[in-house]
Amino acid sequence: MKVIVFGATGMVGQGVLRECLQALDVDQVLTVGRRATARGHTKLREVEVPDLANLSAIEDEFGAYDACFFCLGVSSAGMKEADYRRLTYDLTLAAARPLAERNPEATFVYVSGAGTDSTEQGRSMWARVKGKTENDLFALPFHAYALRPGFIQPMHGEVSRTRLYRTLYAIGRPVFPLVRRLSPRSVTTTVNMGRAMLTLARHGWPDKVLGPEQINAAAGRS
């Protein structure tokens, strides 16, 4: 299996990349981002793209890949809707459309978020944009899934690139085990995110949208 990972330098992407590189049935991993991970591995090829809205230099290669794991994302805090839409919806579809065109049998897994608004009509700006992104992915002619994690526990030193999130994770690290015991259905991990994506690419899943409980269940089948 050949896999593309977008956002491999972010917290979730770091965990997903780790699981892909460890998977015996993954032969090649292509990371696409503004910067490389600088992680050496025989399976890994990294492509730096200054403008992720324009993938014309590499999109003809997408047909050779079986799955794309889209882990790229930004916080909506302090952002205008147009800017958030450009960095969320536009960049996601810029990757998804050429993949769907070149390989309709491919699997595309999008990291969405708990509370995403599938109706696209709610008051929450970020939830509407995420909902629009999910809906348009599902309309494309490939196998699309959206992961809506709640709380994600980093497992192997993964670090968020967002300062606020780094602070929150640092403060909350001592209570991670307690949160998992008290609310196991609302918590997942970076390991399970990666393993769930691999399960979706290998076997599919009955639901297009997976919350934390379904993510953990899918990870158990990897």
Image (spheres, helix red, strand yellow):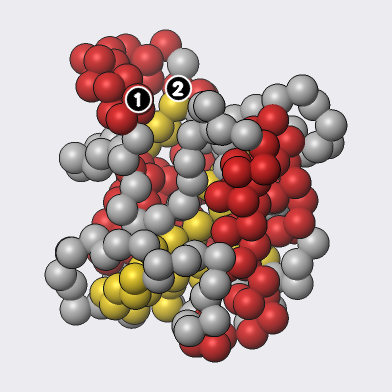
**Residue at image coords 44%, 61%:** 6
Q: Residues within 10 Å of mark 2 (few under 14, many from 20)?
A: some
Q: Earlier in the sequence, mark 2 or mark 1?
A: 1
Vertically, is 112 above or below 206?
A: above
Which of the 4 image quadrants contains residue 142? bottom right
Judged left or right of residue 117, residue 42 is left
For label 1, the SS is helix
- Tell me which amino acid carries mark 1: Leu
| Residue pointed to by mark 2 | 184
Q: Quadrant of residue 174?
A: top left
In the rendering, at what x and y percent does residue 22 appear? Answer: 25, 63
Spot occupied by residue 113 in the image (x, y as percentages of width and height)? 57, 36
Q: Residue furthest left?
A: 40
Asked which secondary structure carries label 2, the reply is helix
Closer to the camera, 16 or 53? 53
Q: Nearer the viewer, residue 211 or 124?
A: 124
- Amino acid of disc 2: Pro
Mark 2 or mark 1, whichever is nearer to me: 1
The residue under the point 18% across, 64% down is 38
Which residue has dot 1 on it? 164
Identity of the residue drawn at 43% across and 77% down: 1
